[in-house]
Image: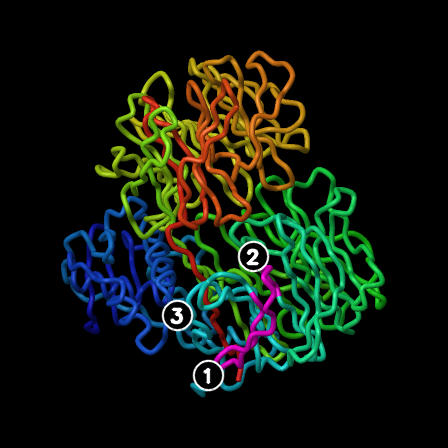
Amino acid sequence: MSTSESYHFGEYRVDVDQRVVLRAGEAIALSPKGFDLLVLLVRRPRHAFSRQELMTALWPDTFVEEANLSFQVSTLRKALGDGAGHWIETVPKHGYRFAADVQASAPLVAPPVAPTDQAPVDPSSRGRATNPRRWWAAGALGACGLAALAYAITGRPSPDPSEPRDGPRQARRLTAYAGFERTPSLSPDGSQVAFSWNGASQDNHDIYIKLVGPGEPIRLTTNRAADDAPAWSPDGQEIAFLRSLAHSDTKVEVLIVPALGQAAERHVGTVAVPPSSLGWTPARLSWTPDGRWIAIGVDEPAESRGIWLLSKDGRERRRLTTTPRDEFNGDSNPAFSSDGRHMAFIGGAGVGANAIHILALSPAFEPIGSPVRVTTPVEVHLGLAWAGDDTALVFSSGAIFGQSRLQRLPLRTDRLAASGPSSVLPFGEQATTLSLSPGGRLVYEVNFRDTALERMHVPAGASSPLASVVGPSTYDEATPAYSRDGSHIAFISTRTGDQELWVSNTDGTNLRQVTFMGGPMCTNPQWSPIDDDRILFQARREGRSAVYMLDLGTLTTQQLTSEEHAYGEARWSRDGKWIYVGAARTGRREVWRLPSVGGAAVQWTRNGGTAASEAVDGFLYYAKATGASPTSIWRMPVAGGPETLVVEGLSHAINFAVGDRGIYFVSRGESPYDTAVEYLDLSSLIRTRLAGLGGRHWWYGAALSPDQQWFMYSVVQSLNSNLMVVDLVR
């Protein structure tokens, strides 16, 4: 028997030397970093580690962002079944501690590694700690993972893995400027990167280029309009990019500028691109490999939705894809294989979801057949690129509120289907847009966001009210709802790593988690108007959502709708007998009504709508979508009848609350950063701006207290992005 450092807590045993964790004698799977994190914590139980302390210990010679640590904590909690933070406790504004007693235990006995010609293992014994293959896999992953990753991502074998300078490298920071560095594009040789940055003064986005390495960026554009989404031409001589047009969320001008920046910009065309929120699934450009065409996703007019080719000289346009008429999300983010025979793009996959599709092309870049979907629908795919010799895709995906990650998807030889499941890469937490050079250099954007709940005292629509933060934290909080008696609020938070529902006092104290879905993203809680024991909420999994009822007494949930039609934005009727939901059963999002005890839903609106609320004046108020961004509030009699436009300029469908005399809402403004809290008097229809949000971006959700003295909403407290670089092979 060999000695080894080991610990146990609850039903878990940790053997440090063998790098294995057992739960009731059964081995559980942990990543190498996850295991290292657990060892750090159990060695000093009840010690409050700072985030920096843990990051320095886990990544001693590498710069990493805090999102990396958050991801590892979240993954470790899931592996330990620790959704409630029983073992690993978050220390607000500081870090984490292991919250249970830990005892040093007798050393574990490592079973011998079986010879390669051993007879097959009895299936009944698989998964137990004595299975030698599982013991071997835990150690082999650390020894061979880097060498395997080089082949997995680039499609080419790596050099000798025993050479430490070969194989993929640690991600390192490429930019760290104030503000937003986003939408990177590598030059064909991978030596330079073009990107959009809002500058040191953070007042306007322009196109910059810099060497991949030390050195300051060079500014290429200086227009007062926002410039974004650069795309380097295949010959490395030019850069195409998008310029936003004034007073429009979607219309952009496609321009070309020499990479040396010594000649005038050239106009290619003007199009309307699919709307985006805070850069999620932003519009991107892609050159055809021969450098003659530029591909872009077009969203308007309706009959033109799809991916189009614009000739470099601006004289010709050709359609590549046609977005289905009933598809909520448009096609965007085209990317061509190196030989130009296939194009990958992000396309809709139902309301509130998208997926990656691939279209086969002729040598003349004409469509062959129809696009095929190659990934599972999720809430957002954020960027993609062809890897290696076109045998795989590298992409980022995730959730608006939750984590996003870089993944790799292997493709069949015909490139029209996956040859296996996608795998998460060991870097790229919170990655969004990305660029991958033919030589294996990857640059990606990492976003850092902190959203918070604020409440504003608004008696009778008082002017210039003051706002205060509710329960400040460094995590996302959104979609607030007041209890019937006004003493509590429910909202979503990502403080455990998953997006779950929480309940607290109205000032954020006495906080407790009330859902433990452990993966599906919970959102949009709504407290019952007749008791304080039930909360409606929406849960989304892989782009499919349903409405649930939570019993606060037992913390049990009941699913009220199917996931088939993306039900969501649920609201109670005033008497609590009915529930209004948004659903896309007709191909367009409409308001439907169903009994609160469950039952068949009946369509209530006919021309679009969602997030419907009854008011004392006998009207039903709801948001209506224009494109992918609901921007107006409408009303109709509760019993049915003609609809009437009430107010325009809503920031999002769920960002309003109806009172007895008026509507409080978060307006969009001319840009997402010119948003404000406003009040609409329902008798006079006079609209009053109560207070701006100080240049901060709106976020999701709004609620009015039962006494109509407080308006609560969600706002982005801080948001920035940097660029990271990884040399996958050397």
- Mark 3 element type: helix
Colour style of the rendered protein structure:
rainbow
Q: Amino acid at mark 3?
A: Trp
Q: Dot 1 corresponds to which residue?
A: 214
Eyeballing the image, is 453 above or below 180? above
Q: Measuring 32% from the left and 26% from the top, which residue is drawn there?
A: 709
- Residue 207 highlighted magenta (yes or no): yes
Q: Give the quadrant of residue 628.
A: top right
- Mark 1 element type: loop
Q: Nearer the viewer, residue 152 or 692?
A: 692
Label 2 to label 3: alpha-carbon separation: 36 Å
- Mark 2 element type: strand
Eyeballing the image, is 293 above or below 664? below
Magenta-drawn segment: 206-229
Q: Nearer the viewer, residue 34 or 683?
A: 683
Can residue 426 be seen in the rendering of this structure?
no
Q: Give the quadrant of residue 409.
A: bottom right
Q: Amino acid at mark 2?
A: Leu
Label 1 to label 2: alpha-carbon separation: 28 Å
Q: Amino acid at mark 1?
A: Pro
Left-right relation of 597 to 17: right
Eyeballing the image, is 420 above or below 502? below
**Disc assigned to residue 136:** 3
